[in-house]
Image (tube, helix red, strand yellow):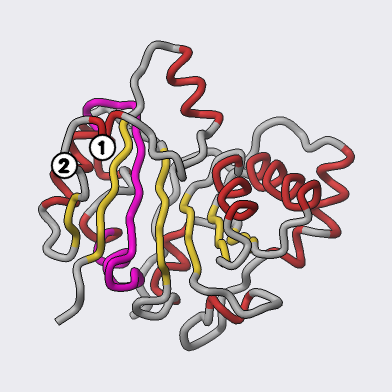
Amino acid sequence: MTPSPPRFYGRRRGRPLREGQRHLAETLLPRLRIALPACGPLNPRALFPFPVRTVWLEIGFGGGEHLAAQAAGNPEIGFIGCEVFENGVARLTAAVARQGLVNVRVFAEDARLMLPSLPPASMGRVFILFPDPWPKQRHHKRRLIAPETLEHLAAILEDGGELRLATDDPGYLGWMLECVTGHAEFSWLARRPADWRDRPADWPPTRYEEKAVAAGRRPMFLRFARRPRI
């Protein structure tokens, strides 16, 4: 029996796209969009028009600020961004066009649909920044950071590859730490409080982070390494 696809709870559309955004969605986005193979694994390195050193994945890229900045600063790396929110995809597509980025590809669906198609040890880094905390107890099962997701991430990360998480919700912070530090394949890279209180220099800010700070909420930044395979 084929397993049921994961249920998605977030928004898919917001305000109607502007004319320029609609034009890019019709012309540029089809060239960036990833289609999963009918059978067999997806070869992430083959998605790009040149040989890439490694591939980094951002799950739920929001408006795409972080992903575009990382892609611009690391032109030798291929980037895959996953986002279901149409307006966020449109903003990233506009950034790709504006900055002439050739190392970005987009999976405009729930990332959990793609994770099983990625080969083992095929990602050098994974970002999940400010995912919905689903703060109510009865909604905790909707949280993206969960044992099943971590199993997939441990499988696709290279040995020594990084998992980077961010949240401004104290409850979700505790949940993240409990889930990831309890997973045998990940080690927390923090050695002092500044390692999770201060955003690293190579970690561009996001629009959501700026909103959180403006609202008086303190973001936390977590870095985990994928332990070497035996």
Q: Judge the density around disc 2: few (<14), some (14-19), many (≥20) Cα neighbours within 10 Å.
A: few
Amino acid at circle 2: Arg
Q: Is residue 90 left or right of residue 47?
A: right
Q: Which residue is drawn at 67% across and 39% down?
A: 87
Which of the two residues, 104 or 42, is positioned nearer the viewer here? 104
Image quadrant in which you'd find residue 80: bottom right
The spot of residue 145 in percent (x, y) is 29, 48
Q: Which quadrant is home to the N terminus?
A: bottom left
Give the structural element (helix, strand or loop) at label 1. Answer: helix
Residue occupied by mark 2: 191
Give the structural element (helix, strand or loop) at label 2. Answer: loop
CB under 8 Å between discs 1 and 2: yes
- Tell how many labels: 2
Relative vertical location of residue 204 with respect to residue 125 in this rendering, above or below: above
Q: Which residue is drawn at 49% across and 72% down?
A: 54
In the displayed image of the protein, which residue is found farthest to the bottom?
40
Residue range (magenta):
150-172
Q: Judge the density around disc 1: few (<14), some (14-19), many (≥20) Cα neighbours within 10 Å.
A: some
Amino acid at circle 1: Asp
Residue occupied by mark 1: 195
Which of the two residues, 37 or 160, is positioned nearer the viewer here? 160
The spot of residue 166 in percent (x, y) is 36, 38
